[in-house]
């Protein structure tokens, strides 16, 4: 049976993994854009940077629990990035297709944060507050990607 500390570290590590997925996904998506897409590249780079900050904060939180720190990516994130690569190859680096795939990734991280904040997560109030603050920025990022996608003809 997991202790509260182990459960807390597990929840925090899951968020580290999906933020690592987000960093890799936005970095890859930025590379798939053409020269005329500097606006999207800037957005993608900002979101990758935001997730790097999230990882630093979450890593410190894991340290506070005394748990073991995860530094990798999730299996589903690796699959998503592979699909993004395949889709970019066939779509000719189409903005709408790239934004649609980015939105799928944002849907996944939104769900991870929502799940992390359930009542049985074992998190301290301090860690729950950290996650809620990060969640707000994640939700705003998702909404921005969705709006950019919807604005494409």
Image (tube, helix red, strand yellow):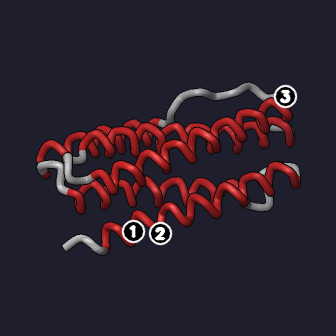
Asked which secondary structure carries label 2, the reply is helix
Q: Residues within 10 Å of mark 2 (few under 14, many from 20)?
A: some
Q: Residues within 10 Å of mark 1 (few under 14, many from 20)?
A: some
- Where does the image place residue 11, in percent across and percent down from the top left? 70, 44
Q: Which residue is mark 1?
A: 146
In this rendered view, identify the residue nearer to me: 89 or 153. 153
Label 3 or label 2, whichever lies nearer to me, is 2
Q: Residue at x 40, y 63 (%)?
A: 145
In space, the residues marked 3 and 1 are separated at their CA atoms by: 38 Å
Label 3 or label 1, whichever lies nearer to me, is 1
Q: Is residue 32 left or right of residue 127?
A: left
Asked which secondary structure carries label 3, the reply is loop
- Where does the image place residue 87, in percent across and percent down from the top left? 20, 48
C-beta proximity under 8 Å, tags 2 and 1? yes
Quarter holding the N terminus? top right
Q: Look at the image and tell me whether residue 1 can be seen.
A: no
Asked which secondary structure carries label 1, the reply is helix
- Where does the image place residue 143, in percent across and percent down from the top left? 47, 69
- Where does the image place residue 61, in percent across and percent down from the top left? 79, 38
Residue 78, by quadrant, is: top left
Q: Residue at x 43, y 37 (%)?
A: 24
In this rendered view, identify the residue nearer to me: 55 or 82. 55
In space, the residues marked 2 and 1 are separated at their CA atoms by: 5 Å
Q: Which residue is mark 2?
A: 143
In this rendered view, identify the residue nearer to me: 33 or 134. 33
Quarter holding the C terminus? bottom left
Residue 96, by quadrant, is: bottom left
Q: Which mark is residue 66?
A: 3
Q: Is residue 115 left or right of residue 86?
A: right
């Amino acid at each position: 049976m997991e202790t509260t500390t182990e459960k807390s570290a597990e929840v925090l590590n899951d968020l580290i993994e999906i933020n690592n997925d987000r960093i890799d996904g936005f970095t890859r998506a930025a590379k798939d854009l053409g020269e005329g897409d500097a606006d999207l590249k800037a957005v993608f780079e900002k979101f990758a940077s935001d997730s790097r900050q999230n990882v630093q904060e979450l890593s410190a939180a894991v340290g506070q629990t005394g748990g073991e720190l995860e530094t990798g990516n999730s299996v589903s994130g690796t699959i998503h990035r592979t699909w993004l690569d395949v889709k970019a190859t066939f779509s000719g680096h189409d903005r709408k297709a790239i934004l649609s795939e980015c939105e799928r990734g944002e849907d996944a991280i939104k769900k991870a944060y929502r799940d992390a904040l359930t009542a049985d997560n074992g998190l301290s109030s301090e860690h729950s507050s950290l996650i809620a603050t990060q969640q707000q920025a994640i939700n705003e990022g998702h909404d921005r990607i969705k709006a950019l996608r919807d604005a494409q003809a």
